[in-house]
Amino acid sequence: MMTIRVTVWNEYRHEKQNELVASIYPEGIHNAIGNYLKTNEPVEVRTATLDEPDHGLTDEVLASTDVLIWWGHIAHDEVRDDIVEKVRDRVVSDGMGLIVLHSGHASKLFERLLGTKTGTLKWRDDGERERVWVIEHGHPIAEGLGDYFEIPKEEMYGERFEIPAPDELVFISWFEGGEVFRSGCCYRRGKGKLFYFRPGHETFPIYHQPEVLKVIGNAVRWAAPIAGAATRSGRMEPIEPIGKN
């Protein structure tokens, strides 16, 4: 099995500004995810953060990344447009995988790849129980999971979620207040694979929960170019993303 090169990108702002978040993720959300992957998956991991030069996403870093994991929340507007375009081109033209987590749904990068504004949804931060239902048990991202898993306390996201219809929908979430949400969405953009995974509010220990981390690990293997991105003909056939121009 070939080693997958993963870059975990994080704003790394909440951990510096909020004592509660710092107590949950003393090394940052990026290292919580990265340390799990290094221990449990066939990967090489580097991290990158918003305040590094070029947001840590230099040409050299991107060229040596098979899968990029993206976590952002309060500083979407600070991400440079030219960096967004470089990342988008790596996905569409070169087949780099992308995993967008939680509030990354409102990032410039996610919206650029999906071709629409994706920040519209219902939300409520009351620490409600979330039940994440697996609706495609045969999908590689759901490997090793049962019918569902629960997150004891989480921020609620509810429909309508303004996204294009996913190519594959792997998870749907239910919350105590009765709302549901499309929480595991797969897309193909050009040569690359994109997975959006909803759980991950920073004030709860979501990235210490085994099932959540397992999903991310599964998604890394699914999204990597070496994990079978070829079509039936054996060739990579680019699909132009919505709203490219």
Image: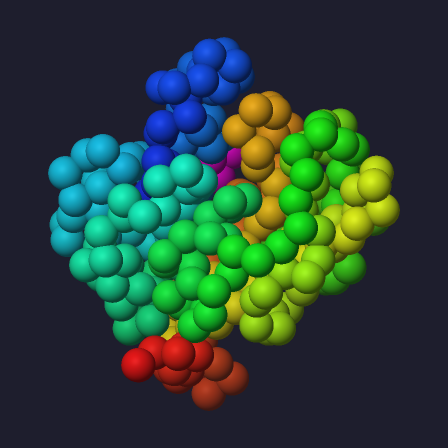
Q: Is residue 60 left or right of residue 62?
A: left
Most prominent secondary structure in the magenta stretch? helix
Q: In the image shown, does 102 or 171 lie closer to the viewer?
A: 102
Q: Quadrant of residue 14?
A: top left
Name the residue at 66% across, 44% down.
123
Give above or below for 50 relative to 204: below
Give above or below for 227 relative to 51: below
* Magenta segment boundaries in residue numbering: 37-41
Total numbered badges shown on the rendered structure: 0
Q: Position of residue 176 (x, y in %)?
A: 84, 38
Name the residue at 35% across, 36% down.
11
Q: Position of residue 36 (x, y in %)?
A: 49, 30
Name the residue at 22% across, 51% down.
80
Q: In the image shown, does 150 or 120 lie closer to the viewer?
A: 120
Q: Quadrant of residue 245?
A: bottom left
Extreme residue in the bottom direction: 233
Give above or below for 223 relative to 145: below
Name the residue at 22% across, 46% down.
57
Residue 39 within the magenta-colored segment of the rendering: yes
Q: In the image shown, does 40 or 120 lie closer to the viewer?
A: 120
Q: Is residue 224 visible?
A: no
Q: Position of residue 91 (x, y in %)?
A: 34, 65
Q: Position of residue 213 (x, y in %)?
A: 58, 36
Q: Is residue 101 visible?
A: yes
Residue 201 within the magenta-colored segment of the rendering: no
Q: In the image shown, does 162 or 83 lie closer to the viewer?
A: 162
- Color scheme of the displayed model: rainbow
Give above or below for 245 relative to 172: below
